[in-house]
Amino acid sequence: MSVIDMKAAKKWKQVPKNLQRKIIENVFCGECFVTTIVDYSLHDDSHGVLLKGKCEKCGKDVARLVEDF
């Protein structure tokens, strides 16, 4: 994981570790469907935290929005 946005990192840190793992392992890829996101970075979004990275299986770009709670 790389941190580009400190505000996003602060939001992500508030998510419990076990839930972080479930989120990372449950990302949609147009090629592989459900996959794990790797080499991801955190970005602040008006709705929460956006994870942008690569599909573990095929290497294509994937993203996952974690809404604020």
Image: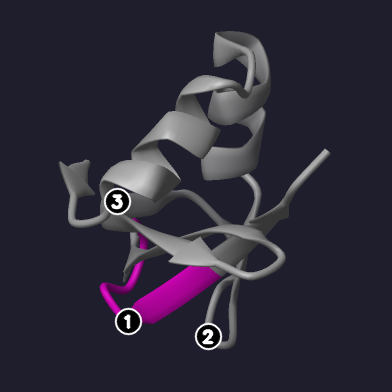
Q: Quadrant of the C terminus?
A: top right
Q: Quadrant of the N terminus?
A: top left
Q: Which residue is mark 3?
A: 38
Q: Is residue 43 left or right of residue 19?
A: left
Q: Which residue is mark 1?
A: 60
Q: Which residue is mark 2?
A: 31
Please state the horizontal and vertical placement of residue 22, each as a whole percent of the image.
65, 30
Residue located 75% across and 47% down the image: 68
Please state the extent of the stretch shown in magenta in the rendering.
Answer: 56-63
> Which label sits in the foreground, 3 or 2?
3
Q: Is residue 25 visible?
A: no
Residue located 32% across and 73% down the image: 58
Q: Is residue 5 visible?
A: yes
- What's under tag 3, amino acid-wise? Val
Q: Secondary structure at mark 1?
A: loop
Mark 1 neighbour class, 10 Å CA radius: few under 14, some 14 to 19, many 20 or more = some
Is residue 18 depicted above or below 51 in this figure? Answer: above
